[in-house]
């Protein structure tokens, strides 16, 4: 972590920002810092000039992929959403919510958006594969996965948020639900917790 963002946050915003930085431990996969993903990038390639070895630190865009460089601000007036993620400003905006559990779910939701914004498209695709395989170990069969995609697509179209939430987002949100022992769809929100409630996955692989 590189320390506080440069712009000023209020004491309440700073308190929630500090919690957000603590929750960053749930995003080692999106930073490509898990053991399996580190191995993925540890490659030796024979070339005309000898052996080339790369590690995950050689990923394009590695520098600056750090949530502690992002700001967090409260936005009391926010239309049709509890949070927003602004990539250009490196800022997360949150509608103040009295319920601490709902607040955490909203911040985690926006953190997924933030990490998606920091990754090149090919690495988003790799993460889709990795998270899909991880959830397979929790009982997300191909049939269940396809059904979840159908539900998610229908909800996205009916709520006009198709562009905002990718398949990678859905997979990471489901993984967080399982990790934090939450009903499926809680982190994703937008009615998913109600629509996904009849799906059953195992918390332990």
Image (cartoon, rainbow, N blue to C red):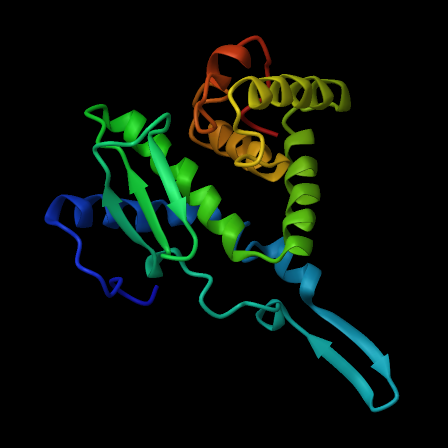
* Left or right relative to 146: residue 80: left
Image location (x, y in percent) of residue 169:
55, 37
Give percent across and percent down for residue 18.
Answer: 24, 50
Residue found at the far left of this picture:
11
Please tell me which residue lies in front, 200 or 153: 153
Residue 149 is situated, as x and y percent measured from the top left of the image, at 67, 23
Name the residue rendered at 14%, 43% in the picture: 12
Residue lying farthest to the right in this orientation: 48
| Closest to the observer, 82 or 33 | 82
Residue, x 34% and y 61% (percent of image)?
69
Closest to the observer: 140 or 149? 149
Residue at 55 percent across and 34 percent down: it is 165
Q: Quadrant of the N terminus?
A: bottom left
Camera sees residue 28: no
Is residue 72 visible from the viewing direction of this image? yes
Q: Quadrant of residue 109?
A: top left
Please give left or right for residue 137 compared with residue 52 in the image: left
Relative to 145, residue 50 above or below: below
């Amino acid at each position: 972590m590189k320390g506080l963002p440069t712009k000023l946050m209020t004491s309440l915003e700073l308190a929630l920002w500090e919690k957000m930085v603590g929750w960053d431990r749930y995003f080692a996969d999106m930073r490509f810092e898990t053991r399996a993903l580190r191995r993925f990038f540890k490659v030796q390639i024979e070339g005309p000039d000898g052996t080339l070895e790369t590690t995950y630190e050689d990923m394009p865009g590695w520098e600056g992929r750090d949530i502690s460089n992002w700001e967090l601000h409260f936005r009391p007036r926010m239309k049709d959403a509890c949070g927003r993620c602004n990539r250009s400003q490196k800022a997360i905006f949150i509608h103040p919510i009295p319920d601490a559990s709902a607040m955490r779910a909203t911040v985690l939701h926006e953190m997924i958006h933030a990490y998606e914004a920091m990754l090149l498209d090919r690495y988003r695709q790799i993460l889709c594969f990795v998270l899909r395989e991880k959830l397979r170990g929790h009982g997300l069969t191909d049939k269940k996965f396809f059904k979840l995609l159908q539900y998610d697509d229908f909800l996205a179209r009916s709520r006009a948020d198709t562009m905002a939430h990718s398949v990678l987002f859905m997979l990471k949100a489901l993984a967080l639900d399982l990790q934090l022992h939450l009903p499926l769809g809680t982190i994703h929100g937008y009615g998913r917790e109600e629509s996904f409630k009849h799906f059953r996955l195992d918390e332990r692989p």
